[in-house]
Amino acid sequence: MQTITETQPKLKKEINTIQLWSLAVGMVISGEYFGWNYGWHTSGTIGFLFSTLLVTLMYVTFIFSYTELTAAIPKAGGPFSFATRAFGPIGGFIAGFATLVDFLLAMPAIAYALGAYIHFLIPQIPVEQTAISMYVIFIAVNWFGIKEGARISLIVTLLSVGEILLFMGLIVFNFKSDNFFAHNPPTISFGSIFAGIPFAIWFFVAIEGVAMVAEEVKNPQKTIPRGYISAIITLVILALGIMILSAGVGDWRKLQQIDHPLPEVLSMVFGHESGWTKVFTSLGLFGLIASFHGNTISYSRQIFALARENYLPNQLSFLNRYQTPHWALIAGGLIGVLAIYSGKTDQIIVMSGLGAVVMYAISMVSLLVLRKKEPNLERPYKTPFYPIFPYLALLLALFCTAAISYFYPLLSAIFFGLLFFFLILFVLFGFKYIKSNIG
């Protein structure tokens, strides 16, 4: 059983229910602004609608199950902590690796989209320059502690949700079903639906990051279920509304391979020079900022938790005087900057999504194992319709993993190759040491 000793660094409990909701929604909400539209390129609007419904079912069953783990084991490691408790060090390593890929690669995609939105407004500003500036700014913001970061997240997330509702209100009366169904292949194949899965995942990916701040939540047994469940309901409504309405205002093919689809949707309705288009693009930065900020918190806490248990260099678990894992913030930022220059947005999204579904699968198996292994573990929240929900989430996560691996074999080979390589190094050099420190 994994324990935190008195000498290990600990995080302060500062987050309440509304702040947790804002962090959960904020971590994800950039996925409503960009990334999902690449699914239209692979699947068309009809095929991608099926992809989205399939992924939505996975996330709903996953979150209702995952909340049990997060409330019962509120540690900064999240999936890493759950898998370590269920399977020991190797299980923890696999979960930790997948989670790091999920969050560390979500960040450069969001940063690049921020750059694309600002470039849309001010073409003289290069996309990469803005993307790197975001890392510098938000590492600095999070340097001063979770309390201040949670307050910023709440404000920005509320603005982002309000903006998306305004966006849907502006375009709903221009929606035409003929536009939604136009330009699709005559038959919808399973292949096209499967190919759209990683981009449908982008609507929701990173909501699991709330588990990384569970150690900093006040009254986690009540706060975590309330925050998580209200967040997934919010995101399902926003995701389906944006995707369906955006496809019906014009020729959706113009949107399928750009990093700023929502301003382009408004330009179809009002024109490029419209005040609504310019204002929305400016306000659209709030949603991207909310996700960038939330994911900065998540990746730093995951690195912190892995370092605290010596899966990563222990220096990365050091805290500054504001009780913030500052070295973890910097290390994740450096990796993100490298990723900005090494891949395209759609490739980064696929890799991040693959890390996410692998982590979802091992988390669901951890839940099933811990129910048998630790029947007396205090579970203030229990999964509804157990074991149907966790089994369904597990099967869908495995299905999504297989679909991504089939349609994106090179990226999948890189992911699993790196996992295998680092796992071998861990077994050879770190396993015995880690095992001796787990009581």
Image: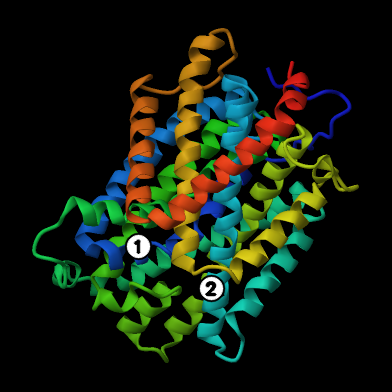
* Residue located 35% across and 62% down the image: 242
* Relative depth, front residue between 67 and 50: 50
Q: Quadrant of residue 389?
A: top left
The quarter of the picture where residue 410 lies is bottom left
Please indicate whether residue 100 sits to the left or right of residue 412 in the image: right
Q: Which element carries disc 1, helix, strand or loop?
A: helix
- Residue 373's quadrant in the figure? top right
* Mark 1 surroundings within 10 Å by alpha-carbon count, few (fewer than 14), some (14 through 19), many (20 or more): some
Q: How is the image coloured?
A: rainbow
Residue at 43%, 48% in the rendered image: 234
Residue 60, how many percent across, how many down? 38, 38
Whether tag 1 and tag 2 are in contact, CB under 8 A, the answer is no
Count of marks overlaid on the render:
2
Q: Residue at x 63, y 42 (%)?
A: 422
Which disc, if any, is residue 112? none
- Which residue position is annotated with label 2? 283
Residue type at numbered disc 1: Ile
Q: Amino acid at mark 2?
A: Leu
The correct choice, above or below, for 248 with respect to 10 in the image is below
| Mark 2, other Cα within 10 Å: few <14 / some 14–19 / many ≥20 | some
Whichever of callouts 1 and 2 sits on the residue coming sooner in the sequence is: 1
